[in-house]
Image: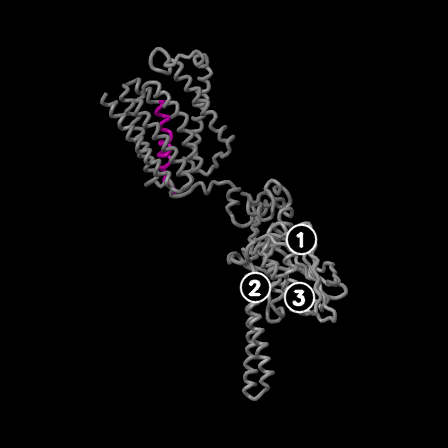
């Protein structure tokens, strides 16, 4: 009796220790720590129940039943988490996973309470004819449940051992320790009754207590000195889809025929496609161009749900174990924001330095001329003009810096009319006409207004005809709206267009001012494209191609400073047919 009492006490202490370890494990941040805590919690409950029931009576049989069915599932949950296998999350999947164990629990409960052979004494503890009649079927359910959980336990042990042995950073002793912690309750229920029958009940209970004590020590050692959570093996075992989705850039895997094999979630979001629709289809159906157009180290302009964006292309070959090429991995990094920012800095540096030098020189020269007896009124006017030009340049720089703001729903007609009215006040000699439908855009209102204002202002300022006009019109297309500004002026010089097309300036090739650059940056921030074409019979049509369904990249343009900055922001200069005539207001 003393051995029996001591065994029950030790089992109870081991149960409490396992419960404390479960709570401590649950406080860790590692994903597998929670499932490890669940395993230890199950062990703690079974140890405490073993201490209370002392391996006698119906309560002990029910504890035996629960231990045999629940602990293997808890061990499997930890093993799957630790290895990196996704546990089923849907209700149906979970139900299918635990259904055999639940069926075994139901059948086992019927067997325990309705058959004398599973209970102490000559008769069953509960005499219910219906239960007795179904004992045979219940035994079948119990056997099926035990076989299922035994198989699950063996798989779980195999996963734990494989994971530990696969990673050199993990202590090899973790394999037997963790395996013992999870397998012991199952083994105890299998062998301890035989031990008790061959010896005494006290010896059997003492064996159980010793096993749970070793489990508590092993569980503590696994987390502590053996470093169970010092590394995260699941990171090396996650599936390809999870790996791809963890990449913040667009990633597409294609075969040598250009068919999509895999793509990540960022690609789906960026180009508005689904994995099911894109997989096995051509790459052009996803990104709009064939794989031959995406060369490693280049920059490609692609149509996205946010409009036109610039992507730095990284392309690498996919090879099998025999080093035979099987396809390519395309990584597309959005560098629109970085390129736009670099353009701004370069252009503003050149323009402001040039204006500051010229205007400051003019101010100094005219001030000295006044001191030398020149006409004070004429010199003063020149000084005022130069000063105003400096102020205008500063204001333009400030306007450019404000490009990139909040995405809101914008009425295109409202913005167009407001811009035209503002510019018309400064150029009363020009006839302005607007013919813009009530189209709703989700974009950066300030960026759109800045772009349109600079285009309209440029058309009015440089118009040298006797009857100058500017017409602002818009037409909806399948995927956006074409906002056109037509004039009958001398046209945009070819070298100005070439500079915008190249995306950069140098000492020999640069724009005459900031107007067209500002328009370019504003359209880019709004997710659109700037195009030039000839007006008939004279003049230019500047078209702002804008997406309607979603906004552009103004938030990125305003704040992003990361990413590669190779190439330039290309502005597609095409000779599309467009014409406009003045309309009386």
Disc number at residue 424? 3
Residue at screen point 36% across, 38% down: 25
Q: Between residue 422 and residue 520, name the one nearer to us.
A: 422
Q: Earlier in the sequence, mark 3 or mark 2?
A: 2
Q: Earlier in the sequence, mark 1 or mark 2?
A: 2
Q: Is residue 123 above or below residue 32?
A: above
42 on left or right of 85: left
Quadrant of the snapshot with the N terminus:
top left
Query: How many angstroms separate mark 3 from mark 2 (CA)?
Result: 21 Å
Q: x, y percentage for residue 10?
A: 27, 28
The answer to whether residue 351 is magenta is no
In the rendering, at what x and y percent does residue 227 appear? 35, 41
Mark 1 and mark 3 in contact (Cβ < 8 Å)? no
Alpha carbons under labels 3 and 1: distance apart: 21 Å
The residue tagged with tag 3: helix, strand or loop?
helix
- Report the label total: 3
- Work out how far the residue at label 1 is from the one at label 2, CA to CA, in angstroms: 27 Å
- Above or below, comparing residue 358 to residue 52 in the picture: below
Mark 2 secondary-structure assignment: helix
Badge 2 is on which residue? 400
Q: Nearer the viewer, residue 58 or 467?
A: 467
Residue indicated by mark 1: 438
Nearer the viewer's eye, disc 1 or disc 2?
A: 1
The x and y percentages for residue 212 are 31, 29
Question: Looking at this view, is 330 or 304 the one in front?
Answer: 304
Would you say residue 367 is visible in this rendering?
A: yes
- Residue 280, position as x, y percentages in the image: 62, 41
* Magenta-drawn segment: 169-190
Disc 1 is placed on an element classified as: loop
- In the orientation shown, which residue stands out farthest toward the left? 2
């Amino acid at each position: 009796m003393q051995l029996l009492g001591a065994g029950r006490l030790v089992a109870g202490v081991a149960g409490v220790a396992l419960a404390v370890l479960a709570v401590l494990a649950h406080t860790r941040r590692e994903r597998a720590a929670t499932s490890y805590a669940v395993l230890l919690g199950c062990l703690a409950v079974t140890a405490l129940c073993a201490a209370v029931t002392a391996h006698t009576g119906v309560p002990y049989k029910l504890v035996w039943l629960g231990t045999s069915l629940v602990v293997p599932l808890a061990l499997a949950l930890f093993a799957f988490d630790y290895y990196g296998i996704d546990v089923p999350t849907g209700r149906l999947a979970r139900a299918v996973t635990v259904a055999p164990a639940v069926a075994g629990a139901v059948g086992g409960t019927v067997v325990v309470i309705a058959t004398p052979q599973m209970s102490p004494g000559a008769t069953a503890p509960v005499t219910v004819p219906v239960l007795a009649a179904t004992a045979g079927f219940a035994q079948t359910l119990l056997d099926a449940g035990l076989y299922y959980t035994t198989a699950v336990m063996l798989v779980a042990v195999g996963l734990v051992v494989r994971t530990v042995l696969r990673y050199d950073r993990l202590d090899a002793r973790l394999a037997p320790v963790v395996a013992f912690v999870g397998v012991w309750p199952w083994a105890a229920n299998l062998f301890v009754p035989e031990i008790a029958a061959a010896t005494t009940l006290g010896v059997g209970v003492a064996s159980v207590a010793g096993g749970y004590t070793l489990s508590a020590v092993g569980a503590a050692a696994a987390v502590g000195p053996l470093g169970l959570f010092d590394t995260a093996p699941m990171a090396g075992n996650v599936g390809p889809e999870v790996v791809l989705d963890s990449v913040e850039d667009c990633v597409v895997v294609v075969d040598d025929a250009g068919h999509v094999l895999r793509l990540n979630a960022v690609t789906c979001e960026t180009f508005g496609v689904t994995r099911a629709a894109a997989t096995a289809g051509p790459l052009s159906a996803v990104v709009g161009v064939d794989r031959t157009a995406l060369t490693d180290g280049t920059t490609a302009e692609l149509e996205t749900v946010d409009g036109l964006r610039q992507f730095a292309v990284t392309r690498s070959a996919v090879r099998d174990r025999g080093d035979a090429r099987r396809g390519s991995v395309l990584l597309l990094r959005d560098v629109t924001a970085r390129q736009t920012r670099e353009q701004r800095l370069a252009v503003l540096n050149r323009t402001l330095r040039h204006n500051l030098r010229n205007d400051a020189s003019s101010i100094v020269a005219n001030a000295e001329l006044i001191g030398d007896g020149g006409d004070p009124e004429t010199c003063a006017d020149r000084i005022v003009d130069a000063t105003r030009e400096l102020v205008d340049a500063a204001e333009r720089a400030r306007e450019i810096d404000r490009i990139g703001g909040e995405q809101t729903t914008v009425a295109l007609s409202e913005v167009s009319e407001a811009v035209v009215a503002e510019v018309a006040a400064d150029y009363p000699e020009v006839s302005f006409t607007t013919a813009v439908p009530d189209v709703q855009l989700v974009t950066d209102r300030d960026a759109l207004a800045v772009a349109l204002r600079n285009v309209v202002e440029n058309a009015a300022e440089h118009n040298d005809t006797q009857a100058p006009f500017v017409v602002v019109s818009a037409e909806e297309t399948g995927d956006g709206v074409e906002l056109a500004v037509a004039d009958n002026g001398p046209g945009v010089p070819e070298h100005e267009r070439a500079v915008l097309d190249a995306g950069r300036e140098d000492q020999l090739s640069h724009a005459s001012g900031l107007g067209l650059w500002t328009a370019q940056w504003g359209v880019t921030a709004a997710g659109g494209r700037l195009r030039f074409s000839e007006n008939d019979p004279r003049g230019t049509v500047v078209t702002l191609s804008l997406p309607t369904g979603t906004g552009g990249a103004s938030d990125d343009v305003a704040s992003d400073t990361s990413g590669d900055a190779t190439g330039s922001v290309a502005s597609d200069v095409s000779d599309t047919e467009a014409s406009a005539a003045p309309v009386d207001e």
